[in-house]
Image (cartoon, helix red, strand yellow):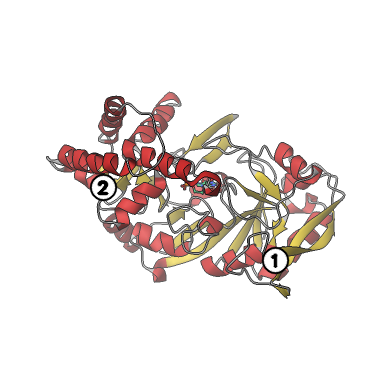
Amino acid sequence: MAVDLLLGLQWGDEGKGKIVDVLTKDYDIIARFQGGPNAGHTLIFDGTKHVLHTIPSGIFHKTAMNVVGNGVVIDPVIFKKELENLDKHKIDYTSKLLISRKAHLILPTHRLLDAASETSKGKAKIGSTLKGIGPTYMDKTGRNGMRVGDLELENWKEKYDALTEKHLKMLQFFDVQVEFNLDELEAEFIRGIDKLRNLQFIDSEEYLNQAIKAKKTILAEGAQGSLLDIDFGTYPFVTSSNTTAAGACTGLGVAPNKIGEVYGIFKAYTTRVGSGPFPTELFDKDGETMASVGHEFGATTGRPRRCGWLDLVALKYAVDVNGVTQLMMMKGDVLSGFESLKICTSYVYQGKEITHFPYNIEPENISVKYTEFKGWKADLTGMTNQEQLPKNLLDYIAFIEQETGVPVTIVSVGPDRKQTITRK
Ligand code: IMP
């Protein structure tokens, strides 16, 4: 059986959590493969909103197993809060949540280093979520990191102390003051670890490959989006992991020839949180309307998201880099009421019109060209099948399918599980 992938194709916040939740009934195992508590996956069902940061979005399903893969970075403090939230809702996770021994741990001092690094950058800051993601992946690739499996060793605290000591020295290199109380941070970290120890630590690559052989169905859940990928995103304004399809292979230990469907999730428009270039960004009433109707605030940080028209140049790039086989369009309902809509179909880069995503998309290097579409007035939020969708929306979707060469198989018309239209 193949592993299907579900990935965001823009700058994150596409609505991956909702779609994983919708698809979970078809899968035995849901596995997260990269990122950490910088993610915020929102699920709404039975009138309740749940936000998950590190835990896979299949956790609310009765039978699905949930795996936090080796490519993920875990902050035990935030993980504990997520588990307590599940406790509050009486979700039994102990037998359904498995953690890779090879996943790296975010230490309190990683968070301090993240804050010091961002502050020292001044205007050039990335706009990080400040969850310690960058410093933790730096320790991973620098071969200094601490992993979940280390917690099973008797000398884990020595490892922790040595790494913390090193981080405190590194903090002194920054020309900025970061206030902290190390004892409090450490006590909180240890409480987090104690909670984490209630879960099963596993060799997740072995578990998943055995599951593939046993013909179990597996869905790999991506975090962030393709344009935040460390290699293919808008570097340096990116996160520190591979958010694209290849990241699922390295982040789970699953071979490329075991990948099946690649579901690419995108919003009917574009948003971005944090700094960095955004060619189709709007600074007018249309952008304000998208932000307010779409409730565009970060699920992790609460920061307002920047909004703009759909960028098909960037979307086609993401489709290629990931090998997307099915597209899923989110938040079409937010565009109801616009007289006309625009899709960016090419850039003008160094005086030439281009249709591929170039090295440099800063505003001084690029301007955008749009194709215009007629809007629709109808409220989509109560619609349940594609026959009800307005013709102008279907034309909008048909254009995207024609340009990308990939079918749009799901149209989401609201945040609830039920507000999901499947297309044949
Ligand atoms: P970091 O991964 O927290 O260091 O943040 C790096 C960049 O990625 C910043 O611009 C963040 O706003 C952005 N980012 C990180 N995680 C997410 C996410 O889950 N959704 C949207 N943007 C994200």
Label at residue 401: 1
Q: Could you tell me if residue 207 is visible in this image?
A: yes
Which sits in the foreground, 154 or 139? Answer: 139
Separation (CA) of disc 1 from disc 2? 42 Å
Quarter occupied by the N terminus: bottom left
Q: Could you tell me if residue 383 is visible in this image?
A: no
Residue located beneath label 2 in the image: 147
Asked if residue 76 lies left or right of residue 22, the reply is: left
Q: Position of residue 151 (x, y in %)?
A: 20, 41
Asked if residue 424 lies left or right of residue 224, the reply is: right
Mark earlier in primary sequence (1, 2) = 2
What amino acid is found at the position of numbered circle 1 in the picture? Glu
Which sits in the foreground, 352 or 398? Answer: 352
Q: Position of residue 41 (x, y in %)?
A: 52, 42
| CB-based contact (under 8 Å), mark 1 and mark 2 | no
Above/below status of 258 relative to 165: below
Q: Position of residue 227 (x, y in %)?
A: 56, 58
Asked if residue 189 lies left or right of residue 349, the reply is: left
* Residue sitting farthest toward the front: 175
Q: Around disc 1, counting alpha carbons within 10 Å, would you say few (fewer than 14), some (14 to 19), or many (20 or more)?
A: some
Query: Hey, which quadrant is residue 165 in on the image?
Result: top left
Label at residue 27: none
Q: Around disc 2, counting alpha carbons within 10 Å, would you say few (fewer than 14), some (14 to 19), or many (20 or more)?
A: many
The residue depicted at 66 percent of the width and 71 percent of the height is 405
Above/below status of 162 relative to 224: above
What amino acid is found at the position of numbered circle 2 in the picture? Arg
